[in-house]
């Protein structure tokens, strides 16, 4: 049942499935109770209400599934060393219930812009980007879409098979993985995310019509935002979410 007060609705969902992406990253598939309906836009997040040590900790998690998938919501998160929220969630099992409010957030991809879109994600920062890309692809042929995805190592490139399959089937979608700790023999790009972005979208190119959607943890997100805006991309065309 949805519990309402003057400013928000609290939802309850059962953990229907847990998927282990790699050693420290899991997806939780949350089934809303049958009388509940959540409407959201690609890129938005839920605020989970976590009962920890006698308090309610609030932790936001992006919805990694698409709005079209209905009442089964996916959140995808990594374990943060000594982080109370992520440790609490990693101790949960199938059949347990989670409470949250939402959807929240203005980092959304609703109507695809009539310009090339570049999605930039680091690690689990792919979570809000995933439904954005699926939405963009579902809208059919359009200006190019690029996913620039950085992670520590190959196993941390989440949903990689999907990105590779989209790149094979959609000529207007390209997938560029970047690894900060590549294995020997890695045939991908050697650059860091900032180096690649600076080279590819600033110094080697004068097109400033692109739209960017950036998500990840910490200062690198705002540094990329500043780099692109300083280079002449429109402020509104560089959207970001920093965790
Ligand atoms: C709008 C929004 C959406 C978010 N969506 C997601 C999501 O889809 N998946 C996800 O894993 N996290 C997401 N986060 C981060 C999440 O809310 C928590 O901050 C994270 O799980 C750490 O919580 P904690 O209680 O375990 O650790 P805390 O003690 O609260 O955090 C410790 C430190 O870890 C940093 N941190 C935050 N997220 C991460 C991360 N993923 N990896 C490494 N360090 C991190 C924080 O900046 C903080 O300094 C989101 C944050 C925001 C603001």
Image: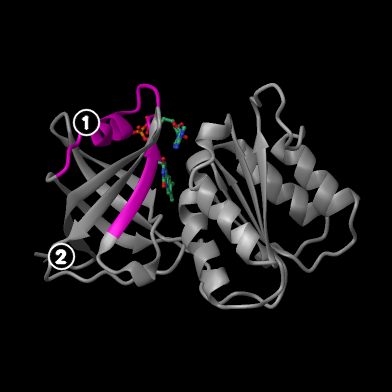
The location of residue 206, given as percent across then percent down, is: 90, 61
Extent of the magenta region: 73-94
SS type, badge 2: loop
Q: Nearer the viewer, residue 184 or 230?
A: 184
Q: Is residue 74 above or below residue 116?
A: above
SS type, badge 1: loop
Cα gap from disc 1 to disc 2, whole angstroms: 29 Å
The location of residue 11, given as percent across then percent down, is: 18, 60
- Asked whether 174 falls inside the magenta stretch, the response is no
Say whether residue 11 is left or right of residue 209: left
Q: Mark 1 — residue?
A: 91
The location of residue 125, given as percent across then percent down, is: 51, 45
Q: Nearer the viewer, residue 34 or 138?
A: 138
Q: Mark 2 — residue?
A: 5
The picture quadrant where one finds residue 10 is bottom left
The location of residue 87, given as percent across then percent down, is: 28, 29
Give me the residue at 81% from left, 53% from top.
201
Say whether residue 182 is left or right of residue 90: right
């Amino acid at each position: 049942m949805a519990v309402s007060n003057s400013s928000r609705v609290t939802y309850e969902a059962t953990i229907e499935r847990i998927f282990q992406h790699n050693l420290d990253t899991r997806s939780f598939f949350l089934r809303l109770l049958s009388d509940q309906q959540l409407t959201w836009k690609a890129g938005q997040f839920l605020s989970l209400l976590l009962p920890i040590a006698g308090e309610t900790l609030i932790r936001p998690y992006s919805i990694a599934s698409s709005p079209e998938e209905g009442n089964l919501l996916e959140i995808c998160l990594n374990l943060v060393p000594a982080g109370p929220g992520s440790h609490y969630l990693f101790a949960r099992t199938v059949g347990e219930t989670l409470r949250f409010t939402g959807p929240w957030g203005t980092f959304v991809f609703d109507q695809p812009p009539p310009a090339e879109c570049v999605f930039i994600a680091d690690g689990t920062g792919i979570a809000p980007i995933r439904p954005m890309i699926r939405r963009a692809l579902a809208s059919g042929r359009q200006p190019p879409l690029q996913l620039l995805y950085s992670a520590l190592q190959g196993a941390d490139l989440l949903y990689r098979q999907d990105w590779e399959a989209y790149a094979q089937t959609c000529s207007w979608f390209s997938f560029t993985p970047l690894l900060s700790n590549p294995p020997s023999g890695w045939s991908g790009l050697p650059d860091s995310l900032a180096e690649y972005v600076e080279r590819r979208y600033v110094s080697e190119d004068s097109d400033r019509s692109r739209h960017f959607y950036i998500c990840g943890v910490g200062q690198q997100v705002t540094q990329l935002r500043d780099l692109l805006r300083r280079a002449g991309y429109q402020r509104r065309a560089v959207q970001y979410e920093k965790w």
